Amino acid sequence: MKRLSLRSSLVVLSLTLLAGCATSGSDEAATAYAEATRPVSALMGDQASSDLYYIEFRARSAESYGHTFAMFGKRDRAGNILTREVAGLHPASTSDVPYVLGHLVPVPSETGPSDGDLEDQYMTANWRIDLDKAQYDDTIAYIRQLQANSPVWHAVWANCSGFVGKIARHMGYRAPSPMLFPENYINTLKEMNT
């Protein structure tokens, strides 16, 4: 019992230290956050939930028209999220300048989490799909390929909704026009496929 209490304390301490990094915009921060937010049962090797996975297509609010991205990881048998990682396409800066320029010309991009992606209170729409191990591995391999081959962001030609649409189409789903605003995009994606 004392060991469980010590592990719980370490998890809380890790969460506290990583809270400021959770939305920093780097892939490393997302991985660290996912590891830190694993429940104690996962840290203790709970094998009962080791083969349950999900992907969730999400939209969140932002100072502009919002952002579309995918969140994925492990879940338990009740559907509760155990780990989460984010993939989405956005300008590679926290400055507004590349974002504004990206409405005219392509700008360098990042494909991990952006500020606010891991904060559920900003979510405006979502569609979660449960996956088995083979489906998850195939989807994640495709996401990694997209991340490696998405060097620019442009509001029209290479935007966050188009990035999510590529993932959905790879999984065998239909995707709406990437010109829809994020909340409408995710809601339409869900309606088209359910």
Image (cartoon, grey):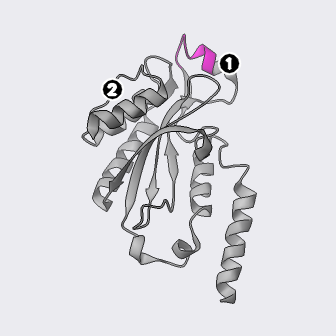
Q: Main secondary structure of the magenta part?
A: loop
Say what amino acid the circle numbered 1 marks: Val
Residue at the image point whose x is 69% and y is 81% from the top: 5
Q: Write down the quadrant of residue 4 in the picture.
A: bottom right
Residue at the image point whose x is 56% and y is 25% from the top: 108
Comparing 105 with 1, the one in front is 1
Q: Position of residue 50 (x, y in %)?
A: 40, 70
Q: Which residue was labeled with disc 2?
A: 176
The answer to whether residue 97 of the structure is visible from this angle is yes
Q: Label 2: few (<14), some or many (≥20) within 10 Å?
A: some
**Magenta segment boundaries in residue numbering:** 99-106
Q: Position of residue 175 (x, y in %)?
A: 31, 30
Mark on residue 97?
1
The reply to whether discs 1 and 2 touch (Cβ–Cβ < 8 Å) is no
Q: Position of residue 136 (x, y in %)?
A: 34, 54
The image quadrant where one finds the C terminus is: top left
The answer to whether residue 89 of the structure is visible from this angle is no
